[in-house]
Image (tube, rainbow, N blue to C red):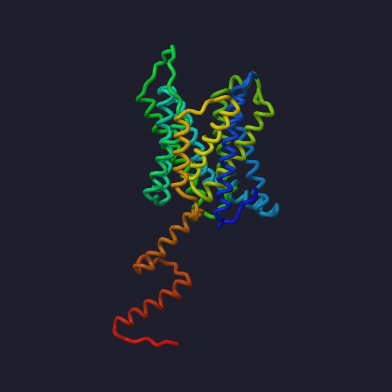
């Protein structure tokens, strides 16, 4: 998967969104199969860690192809990875925030009913939209905001499962649960938009940014492996329970992760959320055919809401590949409409057009006449 040009067209964006959606749906089905088989279960923490390693290797390979020769490839790694500890620290923020999010989600599930958790956790969709507006200085129309909340409701209905009575009484702290889920929602929105901002705030290659993030991701997941399953892994081995199907799940997660970064680069995190919702619908439909699940009224209504919300939000036509470009255009509009805010250094093109216009205006104000030709 070669790096595309910066000025990508709508067809390429739709292709990336479609592939990401299909891969995510297939991943959900394959993961469910591996976690419900009769064989001894593998350690999910090790699978997550290996996924990060594969994503790193794939990003290194794509960067090598992008740079063209070994010399430029080494120089790029030396300059942007080995010689940029500050950039590595900057890209470690999403990995750490996602780790906090996962732990908060676990804490929330331990103190809230599954249905309550499911409803409140979908607030990450409008939270992501809010973070996009606040952190990236973007604007959403009223119709787009309506579609975002409609998507949130649709996902809730698609995943809705009535609470089942249980004889086991579990001591829960609802206040702690709601606090944990609030932190998880904020972490989800912030981490995704933060990565998008870092990705689009400079001309650094997408694959360099991926390498920087996956390096920190490997460290974070290794810590998770040690804390969660360290003792059992020492006893049974790192690759205990692995089958061809498990490796297929890891492959899907790796490819899906790369396409996710491409989608974030060339569209945004809101479109990523719509893609994830579509993947949930597709995986649920596939589960009906493969695992004998039944389509309920709430699922049908939720699917309808998801489809309508995607239609209302619209296609990703706007060029959002760079934040700096948008800021530059905004400044130029201010200059053109009010004549204020011009700060050095001036480019030759600015001087060529702005100075004659200003002189001509001043001359006309004094009642003079201009010569033509």
Q: Residue furthest left?
A: 366
Q: Position of residue 272 (x, y in %)?
A: 50, 43
Left or right, 97 with respect to 243, comes to: left
Q: Residue furthest top?
A: 167
Left or right, 301 with respect to 7, comes to: left
Label total for image:
0
Q: Nearer the viewer, residue 368 or 164?
A: 164
Q: Position of residue 103 (x, y in %)?
A: 47, 29
Q: Residue at x 41, y 30 (%)?
A: 119
Location of the C terminus (image quadrant): bottom left
Left or right, 64 with respect to 106, comes to: right
Q: Nearer the viewer, residue 23 or 131?
A: 23
Q: Residue at x 37, y 79 (%)?
A: 359
- Based on the displayed image, in which of its 4 quarters is residue 330 positioned? bottom left
Residue 100 visible here: no
Residue 165 visible here: yes
- Based on the displayed image, in which of its 4 quarters is residue 124 positioned? top left
Picture layout, residue 86 above or below residue 51? below
Q: Position of residue 367 (x, y in %)?
A: 29, 85
Q: Residue at x 35, y 25 (%)?
A: 175
Q: Position of residue 48 (x, y in %)?
A: 58, 32
């Amino acid at each position: 998967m070669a790096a595309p040009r910066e000025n990508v067209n709508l067809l390429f964006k739709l292709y990336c969104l479609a592939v990401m959606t299909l891969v995510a749906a297939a991943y959900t089905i394959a993961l469910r199969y591996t976690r419900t088989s009769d064989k001894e279960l593998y350690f999910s923490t090790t699978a997550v860690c290996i996924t990060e390693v594969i994503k790193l290797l794939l990003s290194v390979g794509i960067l090598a192809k992008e740079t063209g020769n070994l010399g430029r490839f080494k120089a790029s790694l030396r300059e942007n990875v080995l010689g940029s500890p500050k950039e590595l620290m900057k890209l470690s923020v999403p990995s750490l925030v996602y780790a906090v999010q996962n732990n908060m989600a676990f804490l929330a599930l331990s103190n809230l009913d599954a249905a309550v958790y499911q409803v409140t956790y979908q607030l990450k969709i409008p939270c992501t939209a809010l973070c996009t507006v606040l952190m990236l200085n973007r604007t959403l129309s009223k119709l787009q905001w309506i579609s975002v909340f409609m998507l949130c409701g649709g996902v809730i209905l698609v995943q809705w499962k009535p609470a089942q009575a249980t004889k086991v009484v579990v001591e829960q702290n609802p206040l702690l649960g709601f606090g944990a889920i609030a932190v998880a929602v904020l972490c989800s929105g912030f981490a995704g938009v933060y990565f998008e901002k870092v990705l689009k705030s400079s001309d650094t290659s997408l694959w360099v940014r991926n390498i920087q993030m996956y390096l920190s991701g490997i460290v974070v997941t290794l810590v998770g492996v040690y804390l969660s399953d360290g003792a059992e892994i020492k006893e049974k081995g790192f690759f205990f329970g692995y089958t061809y199907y498990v490796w297929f799940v890891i492959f899907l997660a790796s490819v899906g992760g790369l396409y996710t970064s491409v989608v974030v680069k060339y569209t945004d995190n809101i479109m990523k959320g719509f893609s994830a919702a579509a993947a949930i619908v597709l995986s649920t439909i596939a589960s009906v055919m493969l695992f004998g699940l039944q389509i309920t009224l709430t699922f049908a209504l939720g699917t309808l809401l998801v489809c309508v919300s995607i239609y209302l939000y619209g296609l990703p036509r706007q060029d959002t590949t760079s934040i700096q470009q948008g800021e530059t255009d905004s400044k130029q509009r201010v200059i053109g409409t009010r004549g204020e805010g011009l700060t050095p250094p001036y480019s030759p093109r600015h001087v060529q057009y702005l100075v004659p216009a200003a002189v001509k205006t001043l001359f006309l104000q004094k009642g003079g006449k201009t010569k033509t030709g």
